Amino acid sequence: MSACANYDLIVIGAGIVGASCADAASAEGLRVAIIEPGPIGGGATAAAMGHLVAMDDDPAELALARYSLRHWEAFAELEEAEFSRCGTLWVARNEHEYQAARTRSARLASAGIQAHLVDAATLYELEPALRPDLAGGMLVPGEAVVYPPRVARHLVQRALARSATLYAGRRVVALPTGGVRLDNDTCLSGPVLVATGCALPELLPMLPMRARKGHLVITDRYPHLVHHQLLELGYADSAHGDADSSVAFNVQPRPTGQILIGSSREFSATDAEVSPAMVQRMLERAFAFIPALRGLQALRSWTGFRPTTPDGRPYLGAVPGARDQWVAAGHEGLGVTTALGSARLLVDLILGRQPAIDPTPYAPSRVTA
Ligand SMILES: Cc1cc2nc3c(=O)[nH]c(=O)nc-3n(C[C@H](O)[C@H](O)[C@H](O)COP(=O)(O)OP(=O)(O)OC[C@H]3O[C@@H](n4cnc5c(N)ncnc54)[C@H](O)[C@@H]3O)c2cc1C
C-alpha cells in the first residue's frame, strides 16, 4: 500500500466511540484519519439518552464506567456537551428492591462513586410526581446527562484542529493488509481502529455483534415535573437480561425542560420503524411510576440500535490474528458513558503503554479463543 496516504491511526466510524478515539489519539500527537459515511454521531450515538451512568452488576463494566466518568468531568463546563448534573435516582418498588439498593450503593461506594440510600419520605421530597406507594431508592448525585451527537462532533472538530483528516461521506469497504480501502477505491495505509458499532461484522466477521433495538419518546417542555434521571431498580434485568424484548422505567429531564421517556430493548426487531405497540408498552411502564406523564404532550419518538456483544462487554483491543488492527465496538446501552475511557484504554494499548484499568475483560480474543 505504498501509494496510499499514510497515517499513524485510521479510525473507522465517527460515533461517540470513534470520535473519542480520534480525539484521544490526536491528543497524543498521532496523525489520524477519520472515515465516516454519514453525519458525525449519526448512528446509535444520535439515538441515545445521553445518561452518564455507572452500572455495578459487572465489575469490568463498572471499572470502565468509573474510569470514563472521571474523564467526562472535563466536559462539565463545555457548552457543546449540554452537560447537566441531574443525578440518578434509582427507584425501589418494595422492601426487596430497597435492600438490593443497599447492596448496590455499597458496591458503587467501594468503586469510589458516591451513592446513598433514600427512604420513602426523602424520595417524595426529591420527586413528588412519583406514584405514592414506593419503598425508597438510591441516589447517585454526581451523575449527569449530555447530548451525545454534539459531543461527537466536538471531539472530531478537536481532532481536526490537531491536523486529523476527515474522509466525510466515505465508507471503508475492505481491510487489506496494512490499511483500508474506501468505497471510491481510495486506499489509506497505517494501523486501523474499527469503531463501527453495529456494523462491525461487515469488516470483522469473526467478532459477533447483535443490534438491540431501542425506542425513546420525547415530550413538550414541562420544566418542573421531574428533576433527576429516574430508573427502576429492575432496569439492569432489562439491560443485561437475555429476553427477546423488555421495557424498563427510565425517564430523563432534559435541560430544555422536555422529558425523555425510555426504554425498550428488542433483539429480533431489525427494522428501524417506530413500533406503536412497543411505544405503548414502554409508556405504560413509565406511567406506572409517574402517573402525571400520561397527560403530557409527546412530540416525537425514534429508534436506535445498541451494538451488543455476546457477553455484553465491549471489544476493546487488538483484532485477533491480525497485525495493526484494533477494535472499539459493542458498548450496548453504555457507549456514551464509557466512550472516553474506552478511547484512552485503546490508545494506551496502541502506544504499548499499560492502561489505567485492566484491559483483559474487554480483549476481543475472548470470543475467538
Ligand atoms: C435508545 C438508546 C438509548 C441509549 N441511551 C444511552 C445512554 O443513556 N447512555 C449511554 O451511555 N449509552 C446509551 N446508549 C448506547 C449508545 O448510544 C451506544 O453504545 C453508542 O452510541 C455506540 O457508539 P458507537 O460509536 O460504537 O456506534 P455508532 O454511534 O453507531 O457509530 C458507528 C459509526 O460507524 C459508522 N460506520 C459503520 N460502518 C462503517 C464503515 N464501513 N466505514 C466507515 N464508517 C462506518 C456509522 O456510520 C456510525 O456513524 C443508547 C442507545 C440506544 C439505541
Image: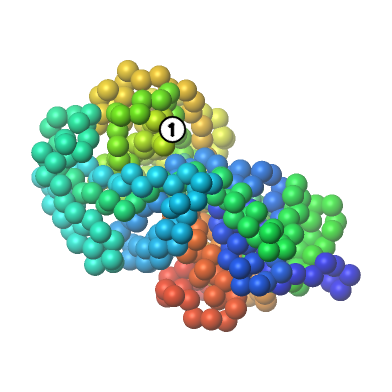
Near mark 1 (Cα within 10 A), the count class, few <14, some 14-19 or many ≥20, is: few
What percent of the width, then of the height, locates residue 22?
63, 62
Q: Is residue 163 left or right of residue 16?
A: right
User: What kind of element bears circle 1?
Assistant: loop
Please say whether residue 120 is visible from this viewpoint. Answer: yes
| Residue shown at the point (50%, 64%) measured from the top left | 342
| Residue shown at the point (44%, 29%) measured from the top left | 218
The residue that disc 1 covers is 256
Q: Is residue 239 above or below residue 298?
A: below
Q: Quadrant of residue 70?
A: bottom left
What percent of the width, then of the height, locates residue 163?
72, 63
What percent of the width, then of the height, locates residue 223?
35, 29
- The three-letter amino acid code for the residue at tag 1 is Thr
Hey, which residue is sitting farthest right in the picture? Answer: 3
Location of the N terminus (image quadrant): bottom right
What percent of the width, then of the height, locates residue 233?
25, 46
| Residue shown at the point (25%, 45%) measured from the top left | 90
